[in-house]
Image (cartoon, coloured by chain):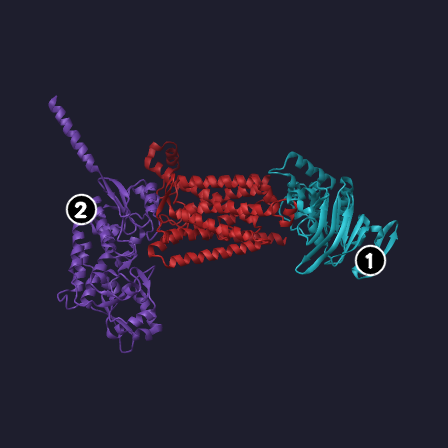
Chain colours: A cyan, B purple, C red
Amino acid sequence: MVETDSVNFILKNKQILKDITIQAQNGETIAIIGPNGAGKTTFLKMLRAFLSLTSGNIYIVNKLLEEYDNKELSKLIAYLPQTTKAVACSVEDCILLGRKPHIKYFPSAEDYKKIHQIMEELHLTKFQGKNVLNLSGGELQKVLIARSLVQESNILFLDEPINHLDIKNQLEIMDVTKEMTLQRDLVTFIVLHDLNLAFKYADKILLLQNGHNKFYGNKENLTEDILSNSYGVKINLINFNGVQKVIY
Amino acid sequence: MGKIKKIVLLCIVSISLFAEEKSIVVKDILDRKVTLNKPIKKVIALGTSLSYVTYLNAVDTVIGIESIELKDVEKRTYTYVNKEKVKNLPIIGQGGKAKRPNLEAIITLQPDVIFTITQDKMEADLLSKQLNIPVVVVGYGRNTIDFETVNYSLKIMGKILNRDERAEELINYILQLRNYFKKPTEIQNAYIGSVAYKGLQGITSTQVDFMPFKLANIGNEASSIQKSGHVFINKEFLLMKNPINIFIDTAGWKLVMDDFKTNDEYYKKLKAFKNNTVYLLLSNTFYYINIDQMLANSFFIAKKIYPTLYPDLNPVEKANEIFNKFVGEELYDVIKNDTGGYQKVYLNDVNELVTEGIF
Amino acid sequence: MEVQIKFWTILTFLALFIVVLTLKLGYMEHSFSTIFQTLLNSDSNESLSYLLWELRIPRMLAAFAVGAILALSGAILQSILRNPLASPFTLGLSQGAAFGASFSIIVLGSATISIGFFQDISLVVVGAFLGAIVSSLLVLGFSMIKNISSEGLILAGVAIAAFFNAATMLLQYFSTDNQLATAVFWTFGDLSKGKWTEILLVFIFWLGGMIFVFIRGWDFNTIVWGETHAKSLGVKIWSLRIYALLVASLLTAIATAFFGIIGFVGLIAPHIIKLIFENQKHHFIFFASSILGGIFLMAADLLAKEILSPISVPVGILTAFTGVPLFLFILIRRVMRGRN
């Protein structure tokens, strides 16, 4: 469970985030959307305690964020940053890093079991033994998602996880994420640029513009007008075969 | 029975007496207690302690040398006289300050003692430990010549090399030389330039406690700066002091000449250059201190500054006497051929700096 | 796996080759059988036995120990700072040691002191050790500045190195001829300057370093992915950085204090390992770098002894001359592979 209450963030006299109040339950997928510079990544970083808020409160599983130390948070939250500069290592070892919050000195047989399990679930077994540097962008992202999932956290924060991927990979990753969210009862926040994907996969949507919370709630309640105002372009919503489509 | 007992007793006593003779203990100049087993037949001399071995007439005990002893042989009297004797000896290292010798080479040659000149007690101890051979440290003085150190070095090396008489002879001779100099009624000052220091230097390199000046009772122009040691003076200082007498170490003469090419105005302002009272001395230092040349220089300087005090003194003859005493050959001409010997410096008609041999 | 087998086999053969040559080559030539016999039975040839056991073997072991410890230090620094240029030299640790040694030689007159149980400790050793520690504390101080990046830390290291260089030069300018020569020669590094005690100490410190990196191995594996990734996986970045810098400094300090400055080993060995092995975890990288560094320095020292025999070339010069082309070769290969 993730909750924020009037979160403000001011950096160098500039208000980056203003009065963000949201609530998310287990099993929910929340898409964070909005124009560039809206503060999406900043917000996610705040939730993960990588930035200190100026005012307001953040609650993770009913406890104030400040009361957790980083190690505890790394067990509760799996955070995948926007950019990853891949490092030479085997796929297996890379995913194994996801177990780091739970490892004292050396990984156990249990840990290895979990790695292989997640690799099977995400169809990554064929990459076993390969160097991460030799994977394509999409394949690497999947490996990183696997790493995040093997962390066995209750909360998943993904910052623009599908940006440079082709359609097939995008859908694959979103499918896996959604499935895992439901299966494991996670709270999942995903920063997305693709509005269609947002509408397809998310339960709730947080629309930020200039640090302001323009909309937070079930995606059904998000109107064309609010979208158009926030993005500054004419956006239309069309219902197509029961699925909400975004046209612009 | 009684007779045999007596003979046996006699044997034991003589053996034990002989055994007493078999080892000696010396304290070297770094206060290290060194035990050596006599007889000392094989010697290795590092750090140009070969000079002392040569002065003590014990070069035939040397079984290996540093390659530095084969270089620039005319620049040092002891290397010159050793030329033929040591050129076929095995090389046991490079030599030169702070460089370690080849340990294996020394061990293979199995010397009875190793002499060295160093300030580093740790290094001497380490060397001795690694080679399992006694190391005796001698020297000429910490940073400049110190006659107490010289005498002590001669004494202990004389004892070790069985040259006690020769050591005594040299010690007395040096004392004799030191006592030769008379005290003038009025002390004159002089300046010494081009003192070697971390390499060859120009005219601004001087030694505040320059031994030849001290021996000959001459005041040092640079003594107002500090009490002892080497110093690089400001060119202006020399101009201000404008000494009548300037002595220059031959080793750095070329640098002075080069400087003159670009700064001739400066030198023309100096009294001594105008007056023709600039003289070149034999090299006081080359790699290490040249004690005999330094002593010889004292006489030349004394003669030039206080000519009336020493009417019968011929510096070249005296130099040769000193060389003969130390290394057994009169080497002034050899030195003169190599670097010019004692020379006068003056400006000629076309204002070039010229040297002229005096003797 | 295959690469591993090949690597260790080649390395073992190389090591044996160097050991054999080190035992055989020297001032005098002896046959293999003589040497072998003398090693087994010292009475058969006392002087050769002394030569082997008191000179050649200690020096060879010193080379291995120093090479291993410097390689480990370099590997730790490169990992923790995520910078391939990090090494004891580029962070000013060696320069700090040089300053400490010069200070002892020139200001304190390189005497000896006795501290309790330890008799006759060279002030030069103490000075070099303290100098390295002081410079590492400076690096540490910089590393604690909030949000300083790895690049920033390398720059700080370069500045610290420059500072100590200048301070050393100042000392040397006012030194006497003899002191200058001693101080300068100290910086060349000399593996004959120590005996069993020093070698043992270096080994012990190396062992301590290996224990540290093994325990924190997975932290290192994580931190190379970047600070955000590492933080999100719960790694205590600051504490790891501080401990790692401290350990790397101690490793460098002990080797440099006894044997002088020997460069490039800490830089090159980890690079070669990372070049040959792409996927390896840091546990392996640290260990393999150490072994490679040790063998590399053994080879360099052997060359240093023999190339101009009986005159010995300072080993630091040889590591530079062999190290730099090797380094450039690695660099070029990396660039070429990057292109493909």
Mark 2 vs mark 1, foreground winner is: 1
Position of residue A80 measured from the top left corner of the image (x, y, whole percent): 69, 48
Position of residue A195 measured from the top left corner of the image (x, y, whole percent): 79, 54
Question: Which residue is at the front of the view, A169 or A126?
Answer: A169
Is C276 on the left-hand or right-hand side of B195? Answer: right
Name the amino acid type tagged 2: Asp
Question: Which residue is at the front of the view, C139 or B87?
Answer: C139
Give yes or no for contact between labels 2 and 1 (Cβ–Cβ under 8 Å): no
Is B253 on the left-hand or right-hand side of B331? Answer: right
Name the amino acid type tagged 1: Ile
Question: Which residue is at the front of the view, B276 or A168?
Answer: B276
Pointer 2 residue = B164
Where is A236 relative to C48, above or below?
below
The quadrant holding residue B207 is: bottom left
The quadrant holding residue B349 is: bottom left
Instruction: Give me the C-alpha separation between circle 2 and circle 1.
Output: 111 Å
Question: Which residue is at the front of the view, A194 or C247?
Answer: C247
Q: Which numbered disc covers residue A226?
A: 1
Q: Which numbered disc covers residue B59?
A: none
